[in-house]
Amino acid sequence: MINIPKKILFILIGIFIVSCTNRNSPIGFPGTSFESHEIVLEYPHFVNIYTFQDTMHNFPGNTKLILGNYNGADARVLMRFISWPRNARTIELDEDPEITLFINRRHNPSTFDINVALIDTVKKNIFMENEATWTHFNNNTEWDIKGGDFHEPPLRSREVNVETDTLRFTIDKSIVHRWMRVTDFRDNFGIIIYSENAKDSFIEFHSTESAPHLRPQIELKYALPNGNKETQVMRANFDTFIHNMQPELKDPFDLRISNIPPRSIYALFNLHYEKFKGVESKEELRLINVNQAFLIFTVDQKNTLMTNTRYSLEVAIPFSKPIEVQRTFDFNNMWTYAPVADSLRAGRMYLNVTGPIQRIVSGGRENNGIVFRNRQRNQDFSHISLFGLEDELESRPKLLIRYSVKK
C-alpha cells in the first residue's frame, strides 16, 4: 500500500476540485473535448506594421561607457573620482596616477585618437550620471557648449590601441592632489574623454555599475611618513557617456528595434474568426485557448548591430487604434504585459505575444494592435533590423498561433 502524506493528499484533492469547476479544464465536465490547431497569419493579414520613435534619455544604471563614433554620432565619457585614502590630504604622490578603463567590446576596431580634459571648473557644472546628455549636465541645466564644457587644450592625447583589454592614461598628480585636498568634493568636476577623429568605430568600457574588479580605477603611488611606499587603487564613483545621435525618425517602414536612437514597433493584424479552424462565429472565439503565439521576423543581418546578447521586450496593447502611422506612442495609455525575452534562431526573431493575443481573441481587449519595445533602449548602439511587408515574401513578418478549441 502506498502511503501519501496528508499535506500532499489535500493539495491533490484541491487541484482536482478546482479543475472540475474550471470550464476550460479538460479534467472537468465529462464529455468535454479540445481540438488543437495551428495557424500562420501572413501578408495581407497584417494591416500595418511600422517603427516609431521612442523617448531619448540617459539610461540609468548603465553598465556601459561608449567612446568613439557610430553612424556619424560621437560618444564621450564623463567620469569623477571622489573616494580617496583616509590620509589623502597629507599624501604626496610620487608619480602621475594612472587611470584604467576595462574594455567590454569593440565595434569596427580602428586606431583613433582620444583626448582627456578637465570638465570646466569655472562654470561649476557637476554632471549627474543618470541625467547627463549631450545638451544637459543634469535634467534642468544645459551645458554652455553641446557635448560638455571642458578645458582646452586637453590634459592628454594619445592613440587607442584596440588590441588591448584596457585603456590606460596618466593624469597630472597636481590635479589629483587638488581633488584629494578640496574641502568640498563638489569642487571636483571630473574629466571628459573624447575623440575628434573616430569614424564608425567605438569601444564599450565597463562602468561603475559593472562588477567591482571591472570598474574604472585610478592607481595612487605615494610614500608613507615612515618612508614605506604605498600603492592604492581607488574606483570611480560616477560615470556615464553622452552622444549626439539624432532622434528623428526618417522612415517608419524601416523596421527595427533600436537602443540608440530608441526605436520600437507597432503591429496590427486581422484576427477574424474565419481564420480559426473549429470556430464558426465571432462569439465562439471565446472558446479558444491560445497555447502559444509568436510574432516571427526575419532579421536583416547586414544592417543589424548586436552588442547585447539578447533583448528583453515590453509588450502592450494601446487603449485606442492609431488612425494613421504614429511617430510616437504614450505607454501610459496602454495595457502592458510581462516582459518577454526575444529568441533568435536561424536568422529569425521569435517574439512571444501569447498574453495579448489571448486577450484580443477572447474579446477581453479590442484589437488595437500590439506595441513592443526593448527594455534596454538608450543603453548602447545595439539594434536589430527586420524585414517588413514590402520585402521578399518569405522574409515578411508572420504571426504563429497554436490554440485549442473547446467542444
Image: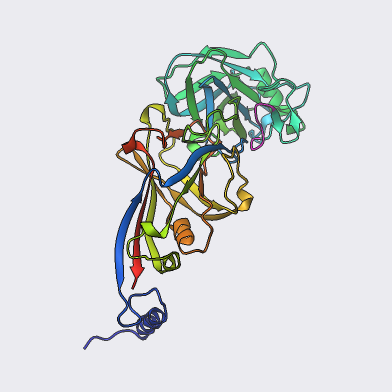
- Residue at position x 36%, y 30% in the image: 301
Q: Closer to the camera, 276 or 226?
A: 276
Q: Identify the colour scheme used.
A: rainbow
Q: Closer to the camera, 211 or 115?
A: 115
Task: Assign the magenta stretch its main secondary structure.
Answer: loop
Q: Position of residue 73 (x, y in %)?
A: 56, 22
- Residue at position x 43%, y 45% in the image: 46
In the picture, the quarter occupied by the C terminus is: bottom left
Q: In which quarter of the image is residue 349?
A: top left
Q: Closer to the camera, 270 or 177?
A: 270
Left or right of 236, for residue 26 = left
Q: In which quarter of the image is residue 105?
A: top left
Q: Quadrant of residue 328?
A: top right
Q: Where is residue 311 in the image (x, y as percent from the top left)?
A: 45, 42
Can residue 227 be seen here? The reply is no
Residue 132: say if magenta: yes
Q: Which residue lies furthest to the bottom in this view?
A: 1
Residue 206: say if magenta: no
Q: What stretch is highlighted in magenta?
A: 129-135
Can residue 366 be seen here? The reply is yes
- Residue at position x 46%, y 58% in the image: 355
Q: Position of residue 6 (x, y in %)?
A: 36, 86
Q: Position of residue 101 (x, y in %)?
A: 51, 27
